Amino acid sequence: MFRYECDLVSKFLEVVHTSNGPFISNSLRQEFDYRSGRTDIVIHDTKKQLLSFEAKLKKWRDALHQAYRNSSFSHYSYVLLPSDTSKSALKNIDEFIARKVGLCTVVDDEIKILIKAPFNEPIQPWLTKSAVEFTQRGN
């Protein structure tokens, strides 16, 4: 369904903006660039918590590693995959649970949480603050 990663991200953002999903945004932005990487999507939600999302079309292990790294500043960290790829990733659910990273996909006009990310207290609160400010600056 998705030819490029940016298509997956665009569809995810479209659904978030229509409030047809589990993530309700106060503010959000793409490409939060910090010293250890660049996060595809960061959402500051209505509960004043920060969520991060790493999107990949195929390489879910790479996304899992990146999402785990994002937990240093995010309250909730997710991997975003197309439906077909998420089936492969789900066979390795223990890896997601061990790293406290969630998994979601976009099917039609719905975001489906396949593994719910647990709450995480960020170990770099200064970076959390920076990411929140980044989301509030707009595009």
Image (cartoon, helix red, strand yellow):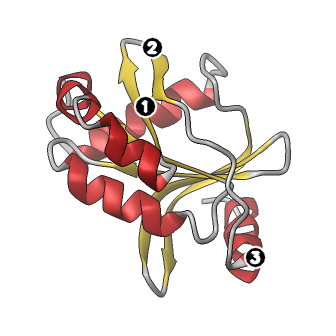
- Please report the residue visible at 25 percent of the width from the left and 37 percent of the height from the top: 92
Secondary structure of residue under mark 2? loop
Q: Is residue 117 above or below residue 67?
A: above
Q: Residue furthest right?
A: 47
- Which quadrant of the structure image shows residue 75? bottom right
Residue 86 horizontal/vertical position (percent): 26, 29
Residue 68 horizontal/vertical position (percent): 44, 61
Residue 126 horizontal/vertical position (percent): 75, 82
Query: Is 123 left, or right, of 47 in this rendering?
Result: left
Query: Is 30 left, or right, of 128 in this rendering?
Result: left
Secondary structure of residue under mark 1? strand
* Mark 3 vs mark 2, CA separation in Å: 33 Å
* Quadrant of the frame with the N terminus: top left
Label 3 Cα crowd, 10 Å radius (few <14 / some 14-19 / many 20+): few
Give amino acid for label 3.
Pro
Q: Nearer the viewer, mark 2 or mark 1?
A: 1
Can you identify the residue that label 3 sits on? 125
Q: Is residue 112 above or below residue 80?
A: above
In primary-sequence order, the first of circles 1 and 3 is 1
* Quadrant of the frame with the C terminus: bottom right
Q: Is residue 83 above or below residue 25?
A: above
* Mark 2 vs mark 1, CA separation in Å: 13 Å
Label 2 Cα crowd, 10 Å radius (few <14 / some 14-19 / many 20+): some
Can you identify the residue that label 2 sits on? 109
- Please report the residue visible at 53 percent of the width from the left and 24 percent of the height from the top: 15
Can you identify the residue that label 1 sits on? 104
- Which quadrant of the structure image shows residue 45? top right
- Please report the residue visible at 51 percent of the width from the left and 50 percent of the height from the top: 100
* Mark 1 vs mark 3, CA separation in Å: 25 Å
Q: Nearer the viewer, mark 3 or mark 2?
A: 3
